[in-house]
Amino acid sequence: QVQLVESGGGLVQPGGSLRLSCAASGFTLNYYGIGWFRQTPGKEREGVSCMILSNGSTYYADSLKGRFTISRDNAKNTVYLQMNNLKPEDTAVYYCASDPSQFCTLLPDPYDYWGQGTQVTVSS
């Protein structure tokens, strides 16, 4: 069974850090593109970052460059999103998704499997 499971969300104060995990089961991430997205109520899903697992290419939303870092652990079949200097506007449900075409895009359409999401709340 193909599955993506996010974890690592929680409540953090402004300026703090969190590392989200996206663990895959039922398939090997090496042959996919993985994207991180976030969504708040009433807004469209926003692309945060993506990676092509076969070559390590990464891409970030311009507004998040320098604060967010995507990485992988092939042995654990897991992709991470390190988020630093968090701001209240980063509050959202964060999702990871897989793209079998191995593209790296911040648009949600090519992605076929999605995790259930993990809530990140940045508040003092």
Image (cartoon, grey):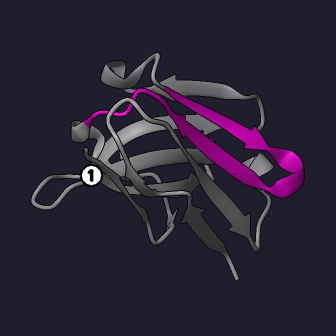
**Residue closest to the eye, 91 or 70:** 91
Tell me where residue 91 appears, x and y as whole percent. 27, 48
Residue 71 in the magenta stretch? The answer is: yes
Q: Is residue 95 above or below residue 54?
A: below
Quarter of the image for the C terminus: give it: top left
- Give the residue displayed 60% in from the left and 34% down from the top: 70
- Give the residue displayed 67% in from the left and 47% down from the top: 79
Tell me where residue 10 appears, x and y as whole percent. 43, 58
Dot 1 amino acid type: Arg
Tell me where residue 3 appears, x and y as whole percent. 63, 74
Q: Quadrant of residue 120?
A: bottom left
Residue 84 in the magenta stretch? The answer is: yes
Q: Residue furthest left?
A: 42
| In-image side of 63 versus 34 (left or right) | left
**Residue closest to the eye, 101 or 85:** 85
Tell me where residue 119 appears, x and y as whole percent. 38, 61
Give the magenta-colored segment's residue range: 68-87
Q: Residues within 10 Å of mark 1 (few under 14, many from 20)?
A: some
Quarter of the image for the N terminus: give it: bottom right
| In-image side of 101 versus 39 (left or right) | right
- Give the residue displayed 47% in from the left and 16% down from the top: 66
| In-image side of 47 versus 116 (left or right) | left
**Residue closest to the eye, 99 or 3:** 3
Q: Quadrant of residue 107?
A: top left
| In-image side of 40 versus 57 (left or right) | left
- Name the residue tied to disc 1: 45
**Residue closest to the eye, 2 or 22:** 22
